Amino acid sequence: MRPQAAQASGGRGKMHLLAVRKTNRTIVLPVILLIAAAALAIAILLSWSGARTDSISLERQEQMLSSTVDTLALDLATSLEGHAIWDDAVLQTHKKPLDRAWLESVYGQYMFSTRGRGESYLLDSADQPYFAARAGTHVGLDSYAERRALVAPRAARLRRMMLHPAANIAYRKWKIPTIVDIVNVHGKPAALILQPIVSETGRIVQKPGTEHVWAFFYWLDARNLQKIASQFDLGPVRFSWTADHGRKEAVRPIYASGSAQPAGYFVWRPFTPGTIVLRDMIPPLVAALALVAAIVFLLIRRIRHSTAELVASEEQAKHLAFHDTLTGLPNRALFDDRIDRALATGRRAPQRGGALLFLDVDRFKQVNDTLGHAAGDDLIREVSRRLSRVVRESDTVARLGGDEFAIIQTDVRSKREIDQLCRRILKAIDAPFDVLGSQIFVGMSIGVARIGRDGHDRHELARKADIALYQAKQAGRGCYRVFAREMDASVRMRQSIEQDLRIALEKGGQLEVYYQPKYDVRSRQISGVEALIRWHHPNQGLLCPNLFIPIAEESGLIESLGEWVLTEVCKAALPWPLEAVAVNISAVQLRNPLFAQRVIRILHDTGLDPHRLDLEITETSFLENVEQCRANLKLLRLAGVRISLDDFGTGYSSFSHLREYEVDRLKIDRSFTNAIDESADGSAIIRAIISLAQSSGLKVTAEGVETAEQSHFLSDVGCDELQGFLMSGPVPLPELDRLLGLDPEIRNPGGRRLAA
Ligand code: C2E
Ligand code: CA
Ligand code: CA
């Protein structure tokens, strides 16, 4: 993965995590708390309602039980009454001898089967027992001895009650004097009921107080009590002498007839519908809760997922906003941010510096113009890939637009590291590019400014990296320059020159055209002149064109400068007895589609014969906008203007394209003339150029002739024209006029000069 991409995806992952954390904080936690609170509320409500239901139910049970206990006596009594108030019973109990089987079936078995476990004793009018039954079976009378202490006093009390006058009335209403008591039979609780046996119809009259008595022990044991309890829908009931009871039990006192003191207690495990309901509800409730939790969990996951998606799309939008669509590299906005950060880091840790690299693809425009935009895009993409490969992961490669790239190199400890990176970049770009099927070569110019050292803010740094880049391009492209203070000075100088030149062109009076004669080899006479501009700078004195022509070309001032020179020269040349006058034309001028027309217009305006104008152009003019240059040249040649190829031999394609240029003359560059004295090679090259020119029908001028040897050699090898300090340097117009033997009056019909 490319470092840039790795960085970006790493950053995206981090954002993801942050988003998830944020959802946790803003959604998950509150939801979990809410569910927990709801569960707690439900639990509290349920247990409260359970407890409430239980307590209501207990109250009811107590009521029921109390009525049970209250009615127990009555109930027992009334159930006994059937056997106590009965004419047959009176007769049977007085029968002699007694029918024990009858007594057993009525007071034994029947009671046993209907009421449960108990003991029956029948006493005669003297309270003497004559029948005993236990658990429904007739037993010996000696068993009464064990119960006498409990029965005798109560029988006596019953007889006193029977003597009471109200007792008789009660007989008729099925209400007879009855004693019901809770007694302790050797630790076993029992209800002891005593009733007299009386006539139901009243036909058998007994003397009150002499009636037989039936004593019935009813055991308050578990089995009997359960019988009662089940009648009232109670849980298991037991009898207790004390009020002590278990945690889950309820207790209810039992009072014996005529006593305010509890004779014992019923203890039972109360029926707790609330608890039961609660217990029954717990599993479905837990299930429902689990379901809710699961749904919430799924919902949260969904939310998290969509949050993550949202973050991702937001990230993508951000990515688009901060990245170049063609290459995916950071764009200017992100680059600005990164450079600010690098500057901040530089301030904090100056020893860990950084560098800002501005990079420009050389000849990119040519690729775009000749191969099309798709090819240009392809090239840019491949350049960005190569750049990304040579930088470190912490470095930033950005595309600022067009063929401009920038790199922020971080953690730079020495200049050597900058040099190494620049060399790596140049090497990577040097390799041929496969663009839409064709192999092309481009170069790269790099300008470097050091973070902190060369600037503490983005703009200052960018300005200096730009200056360094400019210097790199000036140095011939395909190289890098690290900003140095002198560069800044030179840039400032360029700016001031540009400004001054603008003023000079507007105001006039500072620019002057000098003329350098060219000599015919054979006649040794002046055969032509070359116009060379001079600038009398108000502060800096006489300035040479090499200093300001490139600035004029860059700023566009060359167009008006060129027109001014051309006009001056055409005017000056009118009276000369010369075949032609040469004017230097910059590549920038030649690229202008209107150039030829302008030249023709000037010729027309000044009246100079087009055949007498010789335009010197350099081969490098053809490097860009070939078509435009050709069109201009064609038009000019049609008009009769001559064309010379200046500085011949220094360009790229000299020999191969000579014919295509359609020129009249070659000017051998000064460097070859210089080389004549120094090496055989120099001479050989000149020989080759001249023979090539001759075979193409071109005239040859040698420039920079400074020595007699050079002059002789050039004459010998067939050069047509010589130009150089040996004969004459560039001279002002009056001087040339003098050299040409012109009357000064010719320029000054008014005779001002004479008068002076
Ligand atoms: P160039 O066209 O190659 O002009 C010849 C340069 O060589 C001139 O420099 C001239 O003074 C110099 N020179 C002539 N003989 C000798 C010699 O024997 N030895 C040495 N060392 N130098 C010699 P100059 O006038 O400084 O012009 C420099 C360049 O500026 C010219 O090079 C030309 O390219 C450009 N230039 C001058 N005037 C104009 C102009 O009006 N328009 C444009 N576009 N360019 C101009
Ligand atoms: Ca020239
Ligand atoms: Ca030249």
Image (spheres, grey):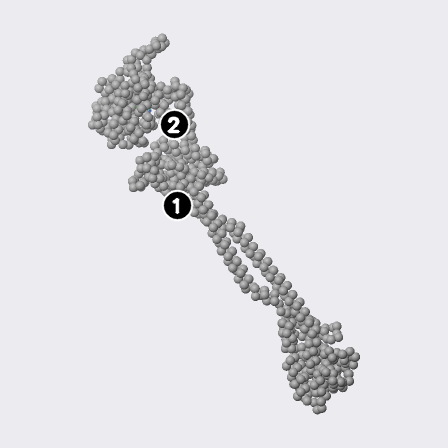
Quadrant in the picture for residue 236: bottom right
Q: Which residue is drawn at 34% across and 9% down?
A: 751
Apparent side of residue 588 relative to residue 106 in the rendered image (left or right)? left
- Image quarter hosting the C terminus: top left
Of the pair 155 and 736, the residue shown nearer to us: 155
* Residue 468 position (above or below residue 602): below
Rendered image: mark on residue 2: 1
For numbered disc 2, what is the local secondary structure? helix
Q: How crowded is mark 2: few (under 14 residues within 10 Å), some or many (20 or more)?
A: some
The picture places residue 26, in percent across and down from the top left corner, at: 53, 50
The amino acid marked with disc number 2 is: Ser
The residue furthest top is 755
Where in the figure is residue 25, as x and y percent of width and height? 53, 51
Expressed as whole percent of the image width and height from the top left, the position of residue 398 reads: 41, 40
Q: Residue at x 25, y 22 (%)?
A: 721
Spot occupied by residue 664 in the image (x, y as percentages of width and height): 25, 25
Amino acid of disc 1 = Arg
Residue annotated with mark 2: 555
Residue at the image point whose x is 49% and y is 50% from the top: 20
Decide which of 158, 606 is in the foreground and name it: 158
Question: Residue 153 or 168: which is nearer the viewer?
Answer: 168
Contact between marks 2 and 1 (CB within 8 A): the answer is: no
The local secondary structure at tag 1 comes to loop
The numbered mark at residue 66 is none
